[in-house]
Image: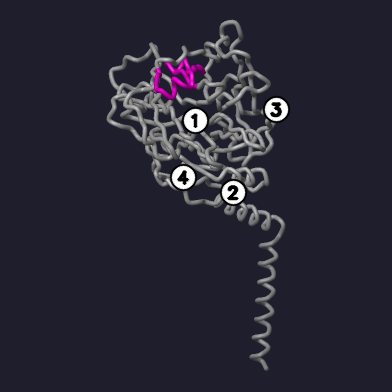
Amino acid sequence: MTTLLVYLLALLFSAFVGGVLVGSLFSKSAYKKLRTFADELLTRRDILLSRVSANPVLAPTNNSWETEATFNPAAVVISGRTHLLYRAIGNEGISRLGYASSTNGIVFDERLPYPAYTALNPRTVRRARYAPTLYPSGGSWGGCEDPRMVKINGRIYVSFSVFDGWDFIRMGVMSIPEKDFLAKRFYAWSSITLISPPGQIHKNWVLFPEKINDRFAFIHSITPKVEVAYCDSIEAIGKTAPFIQSWVGPRDANKSREGSWDNHVRGAGPPPLKTAQGWLLFYHAVDENDDGRYKLGVMLLDQQDPTNVICRANVPILSPDKEYENCGKPGTIYACGAVIKDEMLYIYYGGGDRVACVAFAPLNAFLDALTSGEHASLTSVPLKTS
């Protein structure tokens, strides 16, 4: 009896301790933390876009103008073929635009051995040697950087950063007739129209791929809110029409979305993509708790009023976790191109400020997840590359 009583008391004591532990674990604060942790695990597992196995799809070559880097590609689909204009840096440290194209958007079977565009007469082309560590703007000290490309009414428009030293980083736009672009008659580029004011530093301005209310539309800022500027003629900007005015100042002074992963938003990525649900806009941002790593986010904008954000993924949809996304400038995913082709979404981005890469997702699944509050949860699907 004594032994049985001891075992019974031990069992009751164990039950009491277990109850205390369970109660503590599932108290309101503990339960909230546990639930948040579980949600993060589920979200982070499902949020990722699928990278193609062929990454990187473009890498530096032996051509003197692209020996150091080939990255940050702009993209447009014409007659079922994907065309890229990518930023290339050669051994003299100047950024130019290279050209490549593909039937499936992944294997680029056409690539020119010469630049599609070279900026004329930058102020700082003569240097004793190329030293990328001295020029963290993607590793170059002059030229045309980070192109974005759209097709509007039979013309190809390209917006990019005109970089000619740290006192001269302005947004420029040039265009070419679509037929000349397809024929590789790149001598037909128009002259550059500088659309940002002199004496100011601006980057990451993107042109909508169609006119809105019969006017060209530019997203020139997405933090702390989306700002859109409209104009009747791009070529008139800075001449008969005023320069586009945008927020000016150090990036650190304009933080946004406190408490979110994108608390330090850097800027818009590719030009917006028009979908049935709204304009799909990708952007790059930095989390102060994971400083120095450029990640990709996404938001959905209203078609009629694109300054209105309908929804936004609350975690990054692509993070620089692959070796080729850390090969040059560590921790960098920088998207400049995105297209919709055969109901698939393709995002073209620079990895590590050195190579060009592709991520993809089924468009409808992506939009359904984004708009249903599932944070753009995706399921990987097989993708043919030939």
> Which of the 4 image quadrants contains residue 352?
top left
The residues bearing labels 1 and 2 have C-alpha atoms spaced at a distance of 29 Å
- Sequence-wise, which precedes: disc 1 or disc 3? 1
- Disc 1 residue crowd, few under 14, some 14–19, many 20+, Cα 10 Å: few
Q: Give x and y (percent) for residue 86.
A: 42, 28
**Which residue type carries mark 1?**
Ile
Seen from the viewer's position, the closer of residues 29 and 237 is: 237
Give me the C-alpha separation between circle 2 and circle 3: 26 Å
The answer to whether the residue labelled 4 contacts the one labelled 2, judged by CB atoms less than 8 Å apart, is: no
Report which residue position mark 4 lands on: 51
> Which label's residue is closer to the chain start, 2 or 3?
3
Question: The disc labelled 2 sits on which kind of residue?
Answer: Ser
> Image point 68% across, 85% down: which residue?
8
- Tell us which disc is closer to us: 1 or 4: 1
Write down the quadrant of residue 227 in the picture: top right
Mark 4 secondary-structure assignment: strand
Q: Position of residue 144 (x, y in %)?
A: 43, 20
Q: Secondary structure at mark 1?
A: strand
Depth check, front residue: 267 or 259: 267
The circle on residue 78 is 1
Residue 88 placement, left or right of 161 = left
The image quadrant where one finds the C terminus is: top left
* Residue 14 appears left or right of 360: right
Residue at the image point whose x is 53% and y is 11% from the top: 198
Q: Is residue 154 above or below residue 292?
A: above
Q: Residues within 10 Å of mark 3 (few under 14, many from 20)?
A: few
Q: Nearer the viewer, residue 260 or 233?
A: 233
Residue at the spot of label 2? 377
